[in-house]
Image (spheres, helix red, strand yellow):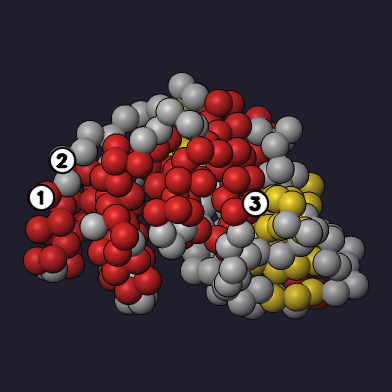
Amino acid sequence: MGVKTKLFYEDIKPFFDIKSLQETKNGESHTVYILDNDYILKIYEEENLFNIDAEIELLNYTKKLCVPKVIKDDIFIKGKRGLVFSKAKGESVVEFVKSTHLEQIGQFLNSFHKMTKNKKHDNLSAFGKSQLKVMIEKTCNKAFKDEFDCLKIELKNDGIIHGDLFLDNATFCGDKLTCVFDFSDACEGDFIFDLAVVALSWCSNKEEINILLKAYDKEIKLDDFIIYLRYASLYYCVKRHLTNRDYDNIIFKNKFIDLI
């Protein structure tokens, strides 16, 4: 999240009565403000309106989980659509990820996947091999191509996945998970890939990955999971390369030395 469209009180006043307006500093895709420290205003940058409706539908469908509650969905500011969500208490984990964080995010993802299994979404998979291959061709990067060619993986279509559950897309209060948010990249996809994205961001070693896997599903073996982790790493390295963002900290062979 972050700010691309600068807003002022007078822009929001017709839609929402507020006393404070606070910019957020992290993120890439959309404009996000905190309203009165109780609500989140998200302005969608160049987003298909059907995708926004799909996100609303998904959040309403999974509202029993700790996901944002849609408060207002009819906001248009500066030609762009916006939504107001409830703001959960707590903060994102910035530095030290504890085992309890891994356990809770693994359990959340398991519950989310159980609810979305076989469920259709307006967005078909955005993380498939054909899409990644096209992205890699745009980079002209031999290392990316070599890694792609080595990965013998067949991704499934299990249901709806989050797709972007990095550390900054969840909050904790007193080490208790309070909210998972930013479902803009949600689409149909492979549940284990979704879990691998979490491992890529939240874990730093074999021990932490095993904690995550156990919390999500005790039947998943680390040896079978590694190829998904490599694929998730490659996908997000390529994506960040194309947007001129640093990706050294998510390169598989650099981050997970004890798995090589």
Is the residue marked by circle 1 packed among few (<14), some (14-19), or many (20+) residues within 10 Å? few
The residue that disc 3 covers is: 100
In the drawing, what numbered circle is on residue 149?
A: 1
Query: Residue at coordinates 50% horizontally, 64% vertically from top-left?
Result: 29
Cβ atoms under marks 2 and 1 closer than 8 Å = no
In the drawing, what numbered circle is on residue 152?
A: 2
Q: What residue type is labelled 1?
A: Asp
Residue 221 shown left or right of residue 32 in the figure: left
Q: What residue type is labelled 3?
A: Thr
Query: Residue at coordinates 13% horizontally, 66% vertically from top-left?
Result: 143
Nearest the viewer among 23 and 210 is 210
Give the quadrant of residue 67.
top right
Q: Is residue 234 visible?
A: no
Q: What element carries label 3?
A: helix
The picture places residue 55, in percent across and down from the top left corner, at 58, 42
How far apart are the two marked residues, 2 and 3, measured between alpha carbons?
A: 33 Å
